[in-house]
Amino acid sequence: MISPELKKVILTELNLDDFNLQDETMAPEVPGWDSLNHVNIILAVEKSFNVKFKSYEVLRLKNVGDLQKLVDLKTGK
Amino acid sequence: MDTIRLDDSKTLWERWQRNAIKNPEREAIVHCVAGEEPTRWTYRSLIETAKKISVKIREAGIRKGDVCAIIMHHNPMFYPLYLGISRTGALPAVLAYPNPRLHPEKFRQGVEGMSQRSGLDYILTETDLDPVIRPLIEKPGSTIKSVFFPLEWDIKNNIDPAADAEIEQISASVKENDPILLQHSSGTTGLQKPVVLSHRAILNHVENLGNGFRLTDNDKIVSWLPLYHDFGLIACLHIPLAYGITVVQINPFEWVLAPILLLEAITKERGTLTCLPNFAYNVLAEKIHDDELNEINLESMRLLVNAAEPVRHDSHQKFVAKFVKYGLNPLSLAVLYGMAEVTLGLTVTVPGKPITELVVDRNELSRGVVKLADNNSVKRVCVSSGRLLNGCEARIVDENRKDIADGLVGEVAVKSVSMFDGYRNYPEKTAEVVEDGWYFSGDYGFRYNDEFFIIGRKKDLIIVAGKNIYPEDIEDALNHLKGIIPGRVIAFGEEDEKMGTEQIAVIAETKAESEKEKNDLRMDILKAGMAIDINIHKVYLVPSRWLIKSSAGKPSRKANKERIMTNEDKQVWSR
């Protein structure tokens, strides 16, 4: 389940009011989330949750659910 | 330094084979996948595998002169496949593997448009694409004869000597002026211009560009560039293979998610040369955490070549400021300018020397005059693209294609020993841009002390992260959206200083009035862009009859971009 906090960071970075982000949602399904923008979204998530991801952790992310799990892991949830 | 003496090979295959005989155990290609040990092709193993694949290609019915589109993910078998096609005298044409974002029907339409223009004969791809590609073959009038899946071919057995000898004979019959490959300009709806290049053009070009790079036997190229792009294909595949040196290939999709992969590969493999579009300098300088860079060492690098999109002074500055402490030599930065029509490069800066930068008066420049800035000037830094490569000529011309003096801005016209012979099956487009042996590039620039400075474009092409995008493609995708007044939409590139590239913006006329209607329309516009794998960054909505028309009666991209950028207009809604 995607937390409201993560959803808000992603939508703010993409300049979207709303989008149905689910665990299985993948970047290409979301307007504006292209490969060039991906790195900005990751940096925004890091800043917002005060965490740092390693490049290899980012490479393994397949969908928004994976990103949520990584955030949870880093924040000790 | 061991300068490389190139032999007198008449074809690429001959050169590759000779390199394999000269240095059989030297690494030709190091194919990297994140988190895995790289696949290392030596010149011997690459050529031997290419020979086996060439037998399969003949068995499949592919013949000399046939155009074979290769649509594959980053895969170590790509390289022997590419070489194997070439050995049989057929022409490889590398196409991008469709992004999941791209609607299958749009992808099919793109390949169909391309096949009609380029005369694609075969598609060599992965089984996943079979359902998308297959209907194209069955369609009446299709040029595509069949689709093959080379990754499924069994090439474990020894090569059949008779089949091998037959192909060797065919290969020997290929002449230096015969075509070797077909490249496409970007685009999605058949606007692509197919460029066919001969063995001679490529051999001439790799020699001249290699000289421009001062290539030596000790060089090792590291690249994440996609091989469907001329910068990747020519600079980072053909040059190293023709020179018999090593290239390290990184997955472009992985690089964009984890830019550090390039720096890690340079460090581990002791790379000396890389090629990057301008935005990559920003990404590398600003999007990697310092604590991930502890192991990075760039001391081995002697050349980082910036090309494929306008070069920005700020991007170089940021990059140097960040990486000097990791061993980067600031003098290793270089700039290349060129186009697929001359194979790749036209001018390059001198390796190991500072890149010339001119601080000019921006207002004078917009009037077409190069005037060095003074205290009263609004300044613009113009970055040199260097001097002409051997075998290349260039002129700066006015709108009547007449030469103009140094220090004035005009269109760059070029001529080269490695020039294309015209767009394939597109004589009217060729006639538009080629006159008396000169190719009129559509790029605006000026010459100053024999160096060329590129400052803009006559054509409306948008370049996002080194990828060429035609505004027509975007406008076609949006034109029929409910909410947009038909025919009343334009697309253009908007400078994104933070990312060091252009981003796509659209202006659409609409009758939508409420905030909700406008937001809904914006979402529809973004989704329509997604369906053709285009990320629309900014949407401007304007009322009916807002767009300025050109003399041809169509909305003018240039005039409307200028209007939206320079005026605060309460009628404009943007997000």
Image (cartoon, coloured by chain):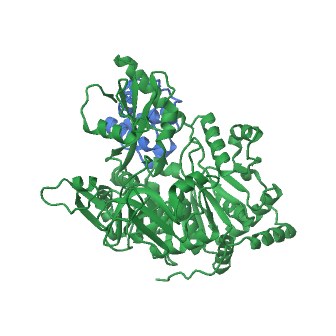
Chain colours: A blue, B green
Query: How many numbered callouts?
Result: 0
Residue B219 lies left or right of residue B312; in this view the side is: right
Task: Give the answer, above or below, for where B190 lies relative to B272.
Answer: above
- Residue B226 visible, this orientation: no
Residue B322 lies left or right of residue B179; in this view the side is: left
Residue A34 lies left or right of residue B350; in this view the side is: right
Front residue of A41 and B178: B178
Front residue of B504 and A32: B504
Relative image position of residue B15 (x, y in whole percent): 65, 75
Front residue of B153 and B268: B153
Residue located at (38% from left, 51% from top): B283
Task: Give the answer, above or below, for where B435 lies relative to A2.
Answer: below
Query: Which quadrant holds residue B424?
Result: bottom right
Residue located at (27% from left, 52% from top): B366
Residue located at (39% from left, 19% from top): B511
The quadrant of the picture occupied by the C terminus of chain B is: top left
- Residue B527 visible, this orientation: yes
Relative image position of residue B465 (x, y in whole percent): 43, 49
Query: Which quadrant holds residue B328?
Result: bottom left
Relative image position of residue B339 (x, y in whole percent): 49, 60
Task: Give the answer, above or below, for where B556 lies relative to B487.
Answer: below
Residue located at (67% from left, 72% from top): B176
- Toward the right, the furthest residue is B162
Query: Which quadrant holds residue B18?
Result: bottom right
Relative image position of residue B495 (x, y in whole percent): 34, 45
Residue B185 lies left or right of residue B522; in this view the side is: right
